[in-house]
């Protein structure tokens, strides 16, 4: 896979990597892992809410009154 970044993105990545004492590749790979994990977590939460909220709808409606 080839990742093409703009000059600004490359510079920002270079600066972040330098500040952390890590390689640009390592910082980019961690960013991808964080992104995937965050979105996977959100998908799981959405799934739980879709199945559990209807189950407690009456109680939640009463609490909201």
Image (cartoon, rainbow, N blue to C red):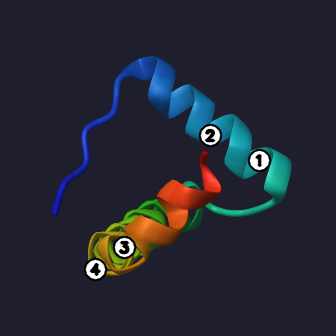
N-terminal label among 4 and 2? 2
Which residue is under mark 4?
51
Image location (x, y in percent) of residue 45: 42, 72
Which residue is under mark 3?
40
Image location (x, y in percent) of residue 13: 58, 40
Quadrant containing the N terminus is bottom left
In this rendering, is residue 2 above or below 26?
above
In this rendering, is residue 15 above or below 41?
above
Specify few, some or many for label 4: CA neighbours under 10 Å numbering under 14, 14-19, or 20 or more: few
Which residue is under mark 2?
14
Specify few, some or many for label 2: CA neighbours under 10 Å numbering under 14, 14-19, or 20 or more: some
* Residue at 45%, 73% in the rendered image: 41
Q: CA distance from mark 4 to mark 3?
A: 17 Å
Q: CA distance from mark 4 to mark 2?
A: 44 Å
**Which residue ends up furthest to the top in the rendered image?**
8
Q: Marks 4 and 3: which is nearer the front?
A: 4
N-terminal label among 4 and 3? 3
Specify few, some or many for label 1: CA neighbours under 10 Å numbering under 14, 14-19, or 20 or more: few
Q: Marks 3 and 1: which is nearer the front?
A: 3
Which residue is under mark 1?
18
């Amino acid at each position: 896979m080839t990742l093409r970044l703009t000059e600004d993105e490359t510079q920002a990545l270079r600066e972040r990597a330098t500040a952390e004492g890590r390689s640009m590749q390592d910082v980019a790979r961690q960013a991808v892992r964080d992104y995937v994990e965050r979105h996977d977590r959100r998908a799981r939460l959405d799934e739980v809410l879709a199945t559990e909220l209807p189950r407690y709808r009456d109680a939640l409606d009463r609490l909201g009154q």
